[in-house]
Image (cartoon, grey):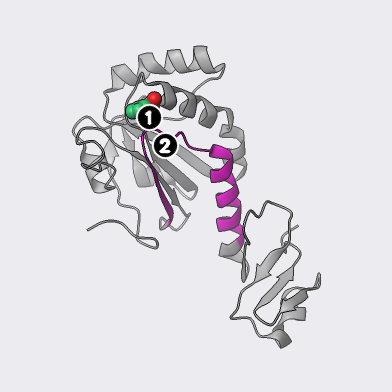
Amino acid sequence: MSLRLGDIAPDFTADSSAGKINFHEYLGDSWGILFSHPADYTPVCTTELGAAAKLKDEFDKRNVKMLALSVDGVESHKSWIKDINETQHTTVNFPIIADEDKKVSELYDMIHPNSNENFTVRSVFIIGNDKKIKLIITYPASTGRNFDELLRVIDSLQLTANYSVATPANWKLGEDVVIAPAIKNEDIPAKFPKGHKEIKPYLRTTPQPNL
Ligand code: BEZ
């Protein structure tokens, strides 16, 4: 059965470019992002891993551990990392799982046979510090991911995990947020002392509460 939001992210132990990794131990008390790519030595994947490496500090700030995956082996990953570092002017500073036996890819349903039987698609799983899956996105091989967007989503997930709010379309850190429909009008002043606007009875906004 495929994984759904709220499920515990399945644990695994696998080889990686940084040695053997147990996923849950690797995550510890942190959040995590697990993202697969189709293959080493391919152009889009090279740009993606370079872009992800350049944002490592941003993921660290949010307490999110990064972990990439493809079905290529450890030696392939290690030599490809040299190419990524050279061509993308960065240093890949997170492990890449070497899922040659496809154990993890199958566990996370990262192989979509109608797309390609042999390679993982560009799956993204964001996992909370409670080990539950908070977000699943799937991109085709032909479309590189936007890692700034993934940081934006993490900002929303981490905010909404702690406050009774939701984030509107295209929201970015620092912008007003939506008060959760479950909050009664009379409870708003105590919960959101920065004030609020009632645009419609069902659309109430407030400044981002944790700033
Ligand atoms: C790429 O990463 O460039 C790629 C991988 C598989 C299919 C198409 C593109």
Q: Quadrant of residue 111?
A: top left
- Residue 12 lies, with reference to residue 4, above or below; the image says above
Viewer-nearest residue: 43 or 29? 43
User: For mark 2, does the 10 Å Cα neighbourhood hold few (<14), some (14 to 19), or many (20 or more) residues?
Assistant: many
Q: Secondary structure at mark 1?
A: strand
Position in image of residue 173 (x %, y %): 69, 51
Q: Amino acid at mark 1?
A: Ile
Examine the rendering and report whether any part of residue 115 can be seen: yes
Q: Which mark is residue 156?
A: none
Are the residues at dot 1 and dot 2 in contact (C-beta closer than 8 Å)?
yes
Q: Which residue is mark 2?
A: 67
Residue 186 placement: quadrant: bottom right
**Is the CB of the residue bearing disc 1 within 8 angstroms of ligand 1?**
no
Whole-percent x and y of residue 78? 36, 17
At 44% across and 58% down in the image, what residue appears?
A: 130
Side of 14 relative to 29 (left or right): left
Magenta extent: 134-159
For marks 1 and 2, the one nearer the N-term is: 2
Quarter of the image where ligand 1 sits: top left
In depth, the one of 84 and 168 nearer the eye is 168
**Residue underneath mark 1:** 96
Pinpoint residue 36: horizontal percent, then vertical percent: 36, 37
